Amino acid sequence: MERKVKVVQYGCGKMASVTMQYVLEQGGELVGAVDINPNIVGKDIGVIMNKEDLGIKITDIKDAEEMLKEVKPDICIIETMSLLEDVKDALLLCAKLGINAITTCEEAFYSFNSNPNLSKEIDKLAKENNCTITGSGYQDIYWGGLISAMAASTHKIIKIKGSSSYNVEDYGIALAEAHGAGLSLDEFDKKIASVDRISEEERKERIDNGTYSPSYMWNVNGWLAEKLNLHITKQTQKCIPQTYKEDIDSSTLNMTVKAGDATGMSALVTSETEEGIIVETECIGKVYGPDEFDKNEWSIIGEPETTLVINKPQTVELTCATIVNRIPDVINSESGFIPTCNMPELTHKIKNLNEYIK
């Protein structure tokens, strides 16, 4: 592609300022922005990036369709909520208009195993209008590609075991609340943990009707299974509250989380497969105490056994860089709602984004 890749930023919260900066530095062109927050709607996007005005005003979400039709972007970056149901309007709008879209919505990473009917609806509309929708972010590499690479150097696999922790303070209030941060343990049990005290039949029913709330690793296990050609026969999920010994102030929640209350949660997902390989993954999202930090640890148990530990990854920046580096893959992809496990291995883009567009 000879011209710059035209990008619209949908959702202008904490992470968007990093993503948009990376788009500009990678030779992309920001042509629009969308948000629901009345405090920033109408402002120049340079304001939230701590830059001079860039000549792009943030559009109210109700006017998003009109703006998208006018600017005709090559791709829309959607950085808002974590569940597919919560981003469906944005994804369906892009699919209807034939605009490629990439989202940090964690469920969209592999939503066919948690909300198949909505996923199929998005897929059908994207195919009809010749565009690609996908989910990506931190998990694309650190819960996906790296583990696939480790598996490729293993002779025999018995179990894949992963654990990743992140500070919900870095991602905004929607994510923090979804993790139960700030709830008492009784409230956590009723609102969060009780969701998974259900039978397999009830879980399947909720998945089929689009009312199941998966943890991030639920979708990661599905992605890994498809990438590694495994066939899941049973998958379970358990959400466990996390606490801290002292009170912790949360700027995101605008409250003090009392000692002993939930600072967030650990979500443990276990998948059994036809091939006999167990995939056991855990994500821990919480408001950090002063001695806590991000950590990503994965082990492949078998022959040989390998453990990968990454301490203090810059999760926000890694997420945003992954999104931007994925842009050419999305634009080059076949049409539909395509998980990144069905795209080429992610690579660093040393040149401007447009130079990778076929």
Image: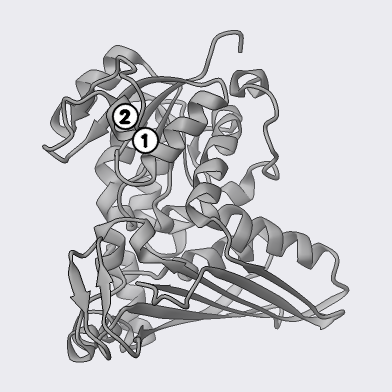
**Residues at badges 1 and 2 in contact (C-beta under 8 Å)?**
yes
Residue matched to label 2: 96
Residue depicted at 35% across the width and 72% down the height = 287
Whether residue 288 is visible: yes
Q: Quadrant of the N terminus?
A: top right
Rendered residue at 33%/39% (across/down): 91
Question: Does residue 150 lie above or below 301 as drawn?
Answer: above
Alpha-carbon distance for marks 1 and 2?
6 Å
For label 2, count other residues whose C-alpha is less than 10 Å away and answer few (under 14), some (14-19) or many (20+). some
- Classed neighbour count for the residue bearing mark 1: other residues with Cα under 10 Å, few (<14), some (14–19), many (≥20): many
Quarter assignment of residue 176: bottom left
Question: Which residue: 31% across, 61% down?
Answer: 175
The image position of residue 185, as x and y in percent, is: 23, 90
Q: Secondary structure at mark 2?
A: helix
Location of the C terminus (image quadrant): top right
Query: Foreground residue, 208 or 227?
Result: 227
Instruction: Tell me the tag on residue 125.
Output: 1
Mark 1 or mark 2: whose residue is earlier in sequence: 2
Amino acid at circle 1: Leu
Q: Please provide percent x and percent y for residue 277.
A: 69, 80
